[in-house]
Image (tube, rainbow, N blue to C red):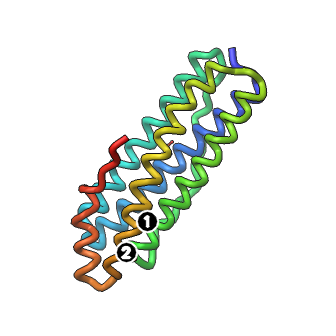
Amino acid sequence: AVQDSLIKKLNNQIKLEAQASAAYLSMAAWCDQQSFDNSAKFFYAQSAEERTHMMKLFHYVSDMGGIAISPSIAASQNEFSSLKEVFEAALESEINVTESINQIVAECRKINDFATENFMQWYVKEQIEEEFVIRRILDYFELLGEDPKSLLMIDERINSVSYTQ
Ligand code: OFO
């Protein structure tokens, strides 16, 4: 079994993943409407992925005898001033998620919950990839600028960013 205080943190992480999924869906909608097709696809896929992250935690909490809580989600930002702003918001969200995951791992170590620490390591690794991909995309804005042609070029490159670990 997992300590109640940690179950609470895991439920909070469930909420964060759900919030990330909802935020990405709003970003996808904005990109879609602006005809940034690949960016839209990227964020639809991210949204679906975040839901799987949420469900993985949800089942873990249940499997360990806790009560997993279906989270309430606040409205997410759906207006953006530029494509770059969308990716900046995405990076900020991922950094917050990473921070929260790290805090859970630190807590696991403090209370010697090695099972949950091991479970959470999957998220530690996943965050390295997610932050890498978004940072790489943000680099394109620095390299190419933000005139309309550059934005289309950036949008074309979105799916070719690869992480090789
Ligand atoms: Fe990228 O947020 Fe899930 O873990």
On the picture, is 61 further left or further right than 154?
right
Q: Say above or below: 65 vs 126.
A: above
Measured as percent of width and height from the top left, residue 38 is found at 25, 61
Q: Please tell me which residue is depicted at 53% across the width and 43% down the height of the picture.
A: 17
Query: What is the x, y in percent for residue 141?
Result: 37, 74
The amino acid at mark 2 is Phe
Q: Quadrant of the C terminus?
A: top left
What is the crowding at mark 1: few (fewer than 14 residues within 10 Å), some, or many (at least 20)?
some
Which residue corresponds to the image point at 30% horizontal and 85% vertical from the top-left?
Answer: 147
Q: CA distance from mark 2 to mark 1?
A: 10 Å
Which residue is at the front of the view, 96 or 51? 96
Percent coordinates x, y for residue 81 in the rendering: 44, 79
* Other-residue count near label 2 (Cα within 10 Å), few / some / many at <14 / 14–19 / ≥20: some
Residue 35 versus residue 127 in the image, above or below: below
Q: Tell me the residue that label 1 is attached to.
A: 87
Could you tell me which secondary element the residue under label 2 belongs to? helix
Position of 157 with respect to 70 (left or right) is left
| 165 in relation to 142, above or below | above
Which mark, residue 141?
2
Do residues under tags 2 and 1 come within 8 Å of each other at their CB atoms?
A: yes
Which mark is first along the chain, 1 or 2?
1
Given residues 64 and 94, the one toward you in this image is 94
Q: Secondary structure at mark 1?
A: helix
Q: Please, is residue 78 above or below residue 42 in the view?
A: below
